[in-house]
Amino acid sequence: MSFRRTKIVATLGPASNSPEMLEQLILAGLNVARLNFSHGSPEEHKARARLVRELAAKHGRFVALLGDLQGPKIRIAKFVNKRIELKEGDSFRFSVTHPRDAGNQDVVGIDYPDLVKDCSVGDELLLDDGRVVMRVEAATADELQCRVTIGGPLSDHKGINRRGGGLTAPALTAKDKADIKLAAEMELDYLAVSFPRDAADMELARRLRDEAGGKAWLVAKIERAEAVADDEALDGLIRASDAVMVARGDLGVEIGDAELVGIQKKIILHARRYNKAVITATQMMESMIHNPMPTRAEVSDVANAVLDYTDAVMLSAESAAGEYPLEAVQAMARICQGAEKHPDTRRSHHRLGQTFGRCDESIALASMYAANHFPGIKAIICLTESGYTPLIMSRIRSSVPIFAYSPHRETQARVALFRGVETVPFDAAALPPEKVSQMAVDELLKRGVVTKGDWVILTKGDSYTTQGGTNTMKILHVGDLLV
Ligand code: G6P
Ligand code: MG
């Protein structure tokens, strides 16, 4: 049996709202559904979440829900005629005082007054994800005067970034704080924080999540230049998070496209090093918004992320607003599986010269070493409360599937993000201890994953309910009487 190890995150939106489409996406292999809080009402998000959970349950699939906070995206206000056309060499102003709905060929309002304070002469401003570029030539107390260096259309509410980053907007807006409560109420599995600058932003989000009674694991979107300025900044942010996203849209604009591929590899490497899951996002299948087939460059981009050993690849507008959401998920699934055949994704050189910090980590990594070097082993069974043990296991490159056995709904959904990890609902604590191994292996026999004569690794602790308690690895011979 061949599993796809790399997981697919797809953003839901008008193109994927209908129960029919959603059902097809789930059957095509959707692992994590992303709800983008930048668009849509709480009611719409709740309806989508409910539908995903119903349809996944109907088909015995496990799909995690990820809410993505809007964050402090800095935007221009509106134009009288909705859009203007700027040419190279034009002069243009951003004004704190200009009426919000009266932008014209010379000037537009901005909703973030500190932009003027944060910028100085010589800075480069990128509008609409870098489609229009300007240089600041003069700055007054309430205005930036700029010269257009790359022209193009500019329309209402387009985003502004500064090359090199460094805009001071705090990561959590009033809307984000309300959405953290909404996420708790919806029992979302993951919550992505947009534009975090450092660990403190993630700690604040964590405190607000706890206060709201939420259990979602927090995903730091790496999308500011200062977050990747040096290893200390990046690692601090990664350590303060439960997972990270390589948010290539804003990040690419701030650091420039030439740096992006190297930074992607570094973020993935560092996330794995700190036992965090990692999602690679933005424009992976962009042309599929209008075409049923990806370009060769997109195929290569997805495959490259798989070879970098990302946990998941993500679709944004392709699945939310595109014409071919199903084809996009299918193409991703196909490309991931194809790339996973490459020997580099199967063998680990990871942590060979390192020491382990914890008992459960030692067992998890010893299991992966055994699984990768004993060809008889066809599967790993990992009894888990929180999903932590299979998370550590899946930091290691392998072709052996990891099955997370857990009685908890949250854990069953959460592991859907982790590379190479599949969910098996299982309540070891409810069984007589001498039956656990046999019943656990029976689940894999039932699914056709193993047959008589195969070997399986099973990990657990002395108690059947203790988080962090894993201290045992067993190698079981399928078909023998197991105790
Ligand atoms: C299950 C096992 C326990 C183990 C635990 C680890 O409950 O039955 O023996 O200690 O998982 O959970 P964790 O959340 O640390 O992966
Ligand atoms: Mg972004």
Image (tube, rainbow, N blue to C red):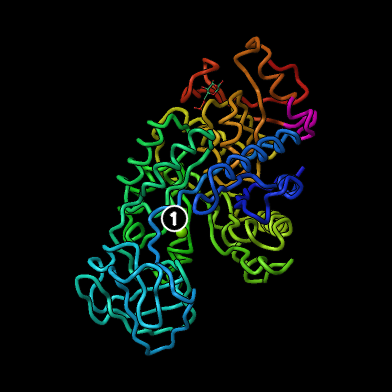
Q: As drawn, which residue projects farthest toward the top?
A: 432
Q: Residue 231, located in which quarter of the rendered image? A: bottom left
Foreground residue among 383 and 320: 320
Give how far across and how far down residue 124 sits, in percent: 33, 76
Q: Is residue 423 above or below residue 327?
A: above
Q: Is residue 342 visible to the viewer in this orientation of the structure?
A: no
Q: Foreground residue, 146 or 249? A: 146
Q: Quadrant of the C terminus?
A: top right
User: Relative to 325, does residue 395 appear above or below in the rendering?
Assistant: above
Most common SS among magenta residues: loop
What span is colored magenta in the figure? 443-454
**Residue at left offset 26%, top offset 70%:** 119
Residue under the image location 62 percent in, 48 percent down: 7
Specify whether 257 is left or right of 483.
left
Q: Which residue is mark 1?
A: 267
> Is 401 rendered above or below residue 94?
above
At 43% from the left and 83% from the top, the residue drawn is 150
**The N terminus lies in quadrant:** top right
Residue 125 location in percent, x, y? 35, 74
Give the amino acid type for the residue marked by disc 1 in the picture: Ile
Q: Nearer the viewer, residue 389 or 122?
A: 122
Q: In the shown orientation, is residue 178 left or right of residue 168?
A: right
Q: Is residue 354 magenta?
A: no
Q: Is residue 276 left or right of residue 239?
A: right
Q: How many marks?
A: 1
